[in-house]
Amino acid sequence: MKLRLFNYWRSSSSYRVRIALELKKIPYEYVAVNLIGADGGEHLGAAYRAQNAMAQVPLLEVTEGEEGSAPQRIPQSVAILEYLEERCSSGEGSALLPRDVLLRAKTRALVEIVNSGIQPLQNLSTTRRVFELGGDPKAWAAGFIERGLNAFDALLSDVERNGKYCVGDTFTLADCCLIPQLYAARRVDVDTERWPRLAQIEAHSLAHPAFSRAHPDRQPDARPT
């Protein structure tokens, strides 16, 4: 299996997928897509739109079978995470969803707080539109991030944690989504230390080599900020 990940170094959705790939120790080709280039970014060009009609990152290209097989493309970060979980969880410690059915559901709920409750309201296309309409993009994003992190923290109280991460002592898809979201929160001056439990999970996670390798600052297209 050959994987190519079309992504942008600072995209929190891309960061999620990189974390999962690193945790599962899956090799992949990094394909940089500049979201802030000329004419609004490479993702808005015809060539990229032909691969992903939503003109978003990440996009995972999967080639299986014999040499010359046509690649399949998977857009949307959570769909990619679920694909990787179903396709590549045979090794010990590589599963990113708990075995317990209820904990699986709660893990997915944590994922969706970030994926549908925060990220679409803070992403580049949304904040650009807020600016065009005369609003304050940073304040807009910060408000929704704070609301979402409050909800994420509250749901953690209903999860049997008893460990260093969101759901126990092993990483799950919830951690893959939380850590990039905290990174994005600080970019709009949200003080993430307001949520001590989330800060603790982040500290434990960032100590793991997979999170270090996936970090935006370590990517080939990273720029000084």
Image (cartoon, rainbow, N blue to C red):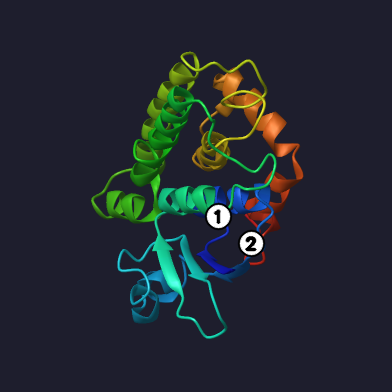
User: Residue at label 2?
Assistant: 222
Q: Position of residue 63 (x, y in %)?
A: 52, 73
Instruction: Rate crowding at label 1 as few (under 14), some (14 to 19) or many (20 or more) other CA atoms within 10 Å.
Output: many
**Nearest the camera: 155 or 24?**
24
**Nearest the camera: 118 or 111?**
111
Q: Position of residue 196 (x, y in %)?
A: 60, 18
Q: Position of residue 14 (x, y in %)?
A: 52, 55
| Secondary element type, mark 2 | loop
Residue at the location (69% across, 54% down)? 25
Residue at the location (57% across, 67% down)? 3
Amino acid, disc 2: Ala
Spot the residue most to the left: 133
| Secondary element type, mark 1 | loop
Pick the quarter of the image with the C terminus.
bottom right
Q: Which mark is residue 10?
A: 1
Q: Is residue 34 visible?
A: no
In space, the residues marked 1 and 2 are separated at their CA atoms by 7 Å
Q: Considering only order in the chain, which callout, 2 or 1, is on the residue closer to the N terminus?
A: 1
Pick the quarter of the image with the N terminus.
bottom right
Amino acid, disc 1: Arg
Q: Position of residue 176 (x, y in %)?
A: 56, 41
